[in-house]
């Protein structure tokens, strides 16, 4: 089947565009891919398919397509699912009688389906794999037409989105059936990013015939329910961004049952049913099957992930007993690998290269040292070296951030340090963080207001800038102490190597029957500007107004070097635009310490 492509809509790809995408990332916002990145993919497909008569690629990319065309046959089938839904797919079949493995790539959650990562498919083909990329059901651009009805883009699949549910697992097995019929592969592997990464893990665990030999899951999740609803707090912004990024209207993209789940989640009702729905879609639910099948599994995530937080991924990784790898990166969702899956780099794109090396070893049998890799590799915030670009005013990384390996996640943290919340810091009006406990103090703030202490400015793009050397700078002087509480150390005499999951214990009192607390840890430099280390919300329902409640919760995992002469700052407020909160009006939250252990921060060190 040919792939229809309007030659007039494709612009010539330039080296300057590729350089800009490499330097800035592929996301314009959480719900907008850079059109130039999409154009690169369209130009590759059109050139590969012979549907453009003009030269639209740089010489490097032109050579890449010619190499693949010489070695492979290109296809754009629509694969029929068990229930008759048509899945848009793209195949690169190597022209060889020798059995070769196939890498199946379910697309991520974007309106462009399988199209976006065409560059990676070509790279896989040159490494010796058949490639079968497909768009999961319901995903992809869908436009209304005059007089009623809709028209789908060529890379859009039929049906409605099952959100990595059982229909998606069955579809994955159907795609394997197709690959076995048309490629006769020597082995089957799955590679996915974001939505495609979760589907990859779930198909591997649930394929009835157990045919998946290895999995690469980039910017992935472990426990979906826990990623979206943790500590009695809903991750509302993340779910809204997903709803807005399907490529079409809600009523077209989701069936009635899924729309009801999403509406219940947004409204905060029937949450037990929502959690059950989420657990069914969680790779961690099926970890015993993955372990029994001994599927080598490569996971990656980011420290400041706003869609699928690091902690549930780490917890899932810990339960795997298979050959495994966990890469943790600076940034937010898809930032480390997004551009590297889309365009060439002047040097190696390490997040992608390591993922492909995993496949080469476990599927092709290449002796490339992967079997000797430590299980965990953590990139440490913000240890890169940068210079300022005089044209953009943005930082450009000149030396990459330090990475540290560990044989297991448990080995990342080698000791802990306890900081007690106290009445006041030695040199300022905020509360203190000290090594000795202090009781009998309290700090009050007005709850229910947004403050300048926030996790991110925007989902994905704040972390994308962070990945590129430009972490968000906070002015701690703008933190309104009427609407939050602050505790800080004095200037540290020695550096702190924060490694692992911090834990906070507070005694809380509210003037109303429920409250939300959002805790943030900041690295504060001598000029009072700060960078965020980690954060996590907690909602306390069913409080008795005016009575004390002890609360302990974990913040998101972090790998962070805190320099000497910097201060560690803990901020607690009641509202962040990422999350639901318990506040319907103004109320007062009081943090207090009723005994020597009631308020403290446990800081993991390594």
Image: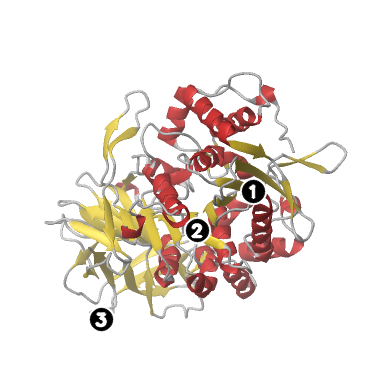
The CA distance from mark 3 to mark 1 is 58 Å
Q: List x then y, in percent, for residue 54.
A: 63, 18
Q: Earlier in the sequence, mark 3 or mark 1?
A: 1
Judged left or right of residue 152, residue 590 is: left
The CA distance from mark 3 to mark 2 is 49 Å
Q: Which element type, helix, strand or loop, lies under badge 3?
A: loop
Q: Is residue 36 visible?
A: no
| Residue wearing tag 3 | 595
Tell whether label 1 touches label 3 (CB within 8 Å). no
Q: Which quadrant: the N terminus?
A: top right
* Observer-nearest of 489 and 208: 208
* Observer-nearest of 535 and 548: 535
Q: Earlier in the sequence, mark 1 or mark 2?
A: 1
Q: Residue at x 59, y 49 (%)?
A: 107
Judged left or right of residue 32, residue 455 is: left
Tell whether label 2 touches label 1 (CB within 8 Å). no
Q: Residue 215, labelled with which disc?
A: 2
Q: List x then y, in percent, for residue 405.
A: 28, 58
Judged left or right of residue 400, residue 283 is: right
């Amino acid at each position: 089947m040919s792939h229809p492509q309007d030659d007039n809509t494709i612009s010539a790809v330039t080296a300057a565009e590729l350089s800009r995408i490499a330097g800035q990332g592929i996301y314009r916002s959480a719900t907008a891919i850079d059109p130039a990145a999409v154009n690169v993919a369209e130009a590759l497909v059109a050139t590969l398919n012979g549907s453009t008569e003009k030269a639209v690629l740089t010489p490097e990319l032109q050579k890449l397509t010619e190499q693949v065309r010489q070695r492979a046959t290109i296809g754009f089938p629509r694969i029929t699912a068990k229930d008759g839904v048509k899945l848009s797919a793209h195949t690169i079949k190597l022209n060889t009688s020798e059995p070769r493995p196939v890498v199946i790539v379910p697309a991520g959650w974007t309106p462009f389906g399988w199209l976006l990562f065409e560059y990676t498919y070509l790279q896989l083909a040159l490494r010796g794999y058949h490639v079968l990329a497909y768009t999961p059901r319901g995903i992809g651009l869908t436009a209304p037409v005059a007089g009623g009805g809709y028209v789908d883009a060529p890379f859009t699949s039929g049906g409605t989105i099952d959100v990595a549910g059982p229909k998606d697992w069955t579809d994955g097995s159907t795609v394997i059936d197709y690959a076995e019929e048309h490629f006769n592969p020597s082995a089957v592997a799955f590679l996915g990013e974001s939505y495609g990464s979760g589907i990859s893990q779930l198909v591997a665990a649930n394929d009835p015939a157990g045919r998946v030999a290895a999995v690469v899951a980039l910017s992935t999740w472990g426990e979906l329910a826990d990623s979206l609803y943790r500590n009695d707090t809903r991750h509302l912004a993340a779910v809204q961004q997903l709803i807005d990024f399907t490529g079409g209207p809600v009523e077209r993209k989701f069936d009635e049952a899924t729309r009801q789940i999403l509406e219940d989640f947004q409204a905060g009702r029937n949450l037990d049913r929502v959690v059950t729905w989420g657990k069914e879609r969680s790779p961690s639910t099926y970890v015993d099957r993955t372990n029994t099948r001994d599927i080598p599994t490569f996971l990656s995530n980011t420290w400041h992930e706003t869609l699928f937080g690091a902690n549930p991924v780490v917890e899932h990784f810990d339960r795997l007993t298979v050959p495994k790898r966990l890469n943790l990166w600076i940034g937010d969702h898809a930032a480390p690998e997004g551009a590297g899956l889309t365009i060439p780099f002047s040097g190696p794109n390490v997040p992608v290269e390591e993922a492909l090396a995993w496949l080469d070893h476990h599927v092709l049998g290449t002796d490339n040292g992967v079997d000797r890799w430590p299980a965990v590799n953590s990139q440490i915030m913000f240890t890169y070296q940068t210079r300022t670009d005089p044209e953009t005013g943005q930082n450009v990384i000149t030396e990459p951030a330090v990475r540290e390996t560990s044989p297991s996640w448990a080995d990342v943290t080698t000791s802990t340090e306890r900081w007690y919340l106290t009445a006041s810091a030695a040199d300022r009006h905020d509360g203190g963080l000290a090594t000795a406990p202090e009781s009998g103090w309290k700090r009050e703030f007005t709850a229910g207001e947004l403050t300048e202490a926030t996790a991110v400015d925007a989902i994905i793009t704040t972390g994308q800038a962070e990945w590129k050397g430009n972490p968000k700078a906070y002015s701690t002087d703008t933190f309104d102490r009427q609407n939050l509480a602050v505790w800080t150390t004095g200037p540290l005499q020695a550096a702190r190597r924060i490694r692992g999951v911090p834990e906070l214990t507070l005694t809380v009192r509210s003037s109303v029957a429920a409250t939300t607390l959002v805790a943030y840890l900041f690295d504060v430099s001598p000029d009072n500007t700060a960078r965020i280390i980690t954060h996590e919300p907690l909602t306390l329902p069913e409080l008795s107004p005016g009575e004390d409640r002890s609360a302990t919760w974990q913040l998101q995992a972090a790998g962070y070097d805190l320099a000497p002469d910097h201060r560690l700052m803990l901020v607690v407020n009641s509202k962040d635009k990422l999350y639901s909160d318990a506040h319907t009006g103004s109320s007062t939250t009081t943090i207090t310490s009723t005994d020597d252990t009631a308020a403290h921060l446990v800081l993991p060190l390594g």
